[in-house]
Amino acid sequence: MRDRIDDLDIQRRIVRCFRAPTSVLVAALIAVTVVSAPADPAHACSCDDQPLVAYADEAIAAFVGRQIDRDVQDESAELTFDVEEVFLGEVPAAFRVRTAADGDACGVDLDGFGSVGVVAFGSLEAPTVGACPMTVPRGQLESVFGSGTAPPTDDVTTTSNTAARATLIGLLLVVLVAGAVLVHHRRRPEGV
């Protein structure tokens, strides 16, 4: 019987010897699997079902327009709209906004939807749009922001560009005349 106990004791010791390294090996395999697994960016887009008036204080622009271009770069997209009517903000006839490139991240793409009501947030220098509340009916825009107006026409832009060019040309002429006077003054002999 003593031999039997020794055999059992030996078996237990062998099992104990392999149990610890096996646990470490399994833990290492799990760690390598978790660390080396490709991580996709996490996206979650869900909106509270709130009326537009709940978002109105944060809005910087509201307009009706048609998407005419979508330029995707990395994980964001720039949408260009042909603006038909402005309800809030200083929105030009062609207005660009940023959005996420992926719908799962609340990004939008309105190509093919025709004229839609759009609400933008952020700043007029870097306006953004998302799915909450991205598009709204024209009537809702009017009831929250008042009646709309036509966007500025290209004539305003052309006039301001023409004025800027005229100012630049005038400034260049002043510099040239001052330079000519200075050169003429230096060439004149002293005492004359």
Image (spheres, rainbow, N blue to C red):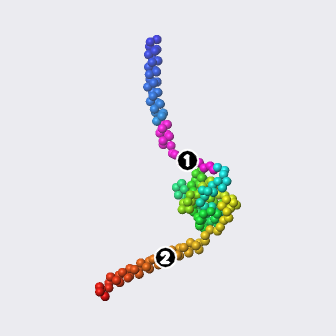
Q: In this figure, which residue is indicated by the disc labeled 1?
A: 42
Taking the spot 58% from the left edge, 57% from the top edge, the residue there is: 121
Taking the spot 44% from the left edge, 30% from the top edge, the residue there is: 21
* Mark 1 secondary-structure assignment: loop
The residue sitting at the front extreme is 191
Question: Does 109 sit above or below residue 48?
Answer: below
Between residue 9 and residue 96, name the one nearer to us. 96
Residue 79: x %, y % from top left: 58, 61
Q: Earlier in the sequence, mark 1 or mark 2?
A: 1
- Write the start and end of the magenta stretch as one range: 29-47
The reply to whether the magenta stretch includes residue 184 is no
Residue 35: x %, y % from top left: 48, 41
Q: In this figure, which residue is indicated by the disc labeled 2?
A: 167
Asked if residue 150 lies left or right of residue 175, the reply is: right
Q: Report how far apart the C-alphas of labels 1 and 2 lie in the structure.
A: 52 Å
Asked if residue 71 lies left or right of residue 145, the reply is: left
The residue sitting at the left extreme is 190
Instruction: Please indicate, yes or no, whether residue 65 appears anywhere in the rendered image.
Output: no
Q: Amino acid at mark 1?
A: Ala
